[in-house]
Each structure stands twice: as structure tokens, then as C-alpha cells.
Image: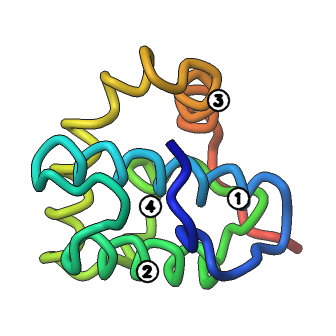
């Protein structure tokens, strides 16, 4: 199932596009299973997805980034950080069955060490 308008903004690289698709898939799974949404995200999940995409667009590491959970710079507000953690805890293990390649690439991205450009 593909939901329209889950990634309204473009990202600077294929790496960040993949990261945006991964977080969208996780939030979509969480919203469907926890909030009963079938075609559109609920307002809370839509807000979280928009926030996550905004943070990705402004990430100081860009293509060199690791996953957000392993990043030394915590750019999420504490409330949003806790919400995205709940989504990741729930959806992460389930991604192995619904999106195995995406899940594997996300795990590999978590092995990266963030380094700034320049």
C-alpha cells in the first residue's frame, strides 16, 4: 500500500531520500497498526512525519549521517524524540517482514560514523 503525499519535499541525495522513505514506512506502519489508519495518516502521525522530514532536510551531516538514534547531535525536541522512539521500537522489527531491504539498509546506515563535511 502506497499512501499519497508522504514525501512532499525532495532531499539532496538518494541516501537522504532513502532515509525519508524509511521513516515514512515506519510511521505508516505504526499509524496503521496503532491508530487504525488505512489510507491517510492520522493528524499526530502526519505531524511527526513532517517534523522528521524537516529535521532530515536540516541535518548537519547530510549524506554522511548515521541513523538519527545513533547521532551525536540530538536535533529532535524531547517530546518528538520520544514519539519517534516509540514508532521505531514498534515498527523497526516489523520492517524485516514488510520491507526487508529497507530494514537491512537502515541497519547498515546505523553502522556509519557521522562526520561533518569539509
User: Quadrant location of the C terminus?
Assistant: bottom right
The residue identified by callout 2 is 50
Secondary structure category for the residue under label 1: loop
- Decide: few, some or many residues near mark 1? Use Cα within 10 Å; few <14, some 14-19, many ≥20: few
Sequence-first tag of 2 and 3: 2
Looking at marks 4 and 1 on the same chain, the residue that comes earlier in the sequence is marked by 4
Marks 4/2: CA–CA distance: 22 Å
Residue 108 percent coordinates (x, y) = 62, 27
Q: Between residues 54 and 44, which one lies in front from this camera angle?
A: 44
> Which badge, 3 or 4, is on the more N-terminal residue?
4
Alpha carbon of mark 2 to alpha carbon of mark 3: how far? 22 Å
Residue 112 percent location from the top left of the image: 64, 39
Task: Write down the residue under mark 3.
Answer: 105
Mark 3 / mark 1, whichever is N-terminal? 3
Q: Which residue is more in the foreground, 72 or 58?
A: 58
Q: CA distance from mark 3 to mark 4?
A: 20 Å
Front tag of 2 and 1:
2
Amino acid at each position: 500500500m502506497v499512501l499519497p503525499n508522504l514525501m512532499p519535499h525532495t532531499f539532496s541525495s538518494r541516501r537522504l531520500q532513502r532515509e525519508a522513505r524509511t521513516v515514512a514506512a515506519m510511521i505508516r506502519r505504526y499509524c496503521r497498526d496503532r491508530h487504525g489508519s488505512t489510507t491517510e495518516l492520522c493528524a499526530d502521525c502526519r505531524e511527526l512525519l513532517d517534523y522528521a522530514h524537516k529535521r532530515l532536510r536540516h541535518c548537519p551531516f547530510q549524506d554522511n549521517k548515521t541513523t538519527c538514534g545513533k547521532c551525536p547531535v540530538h536535533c529532535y525536541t524531547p517530546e518528538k524524540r520520544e514519539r519517534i522512539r516509540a514508532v521505531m521500537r514498534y515498527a523497526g522489527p516489523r520492517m524485516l517482514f514488510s520491507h526487508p531491504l529497507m530494514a537491512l539498509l537502515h541497519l547498515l546506515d546505523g553502522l556509519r560514523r557521522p562526520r561533518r563535511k569539509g
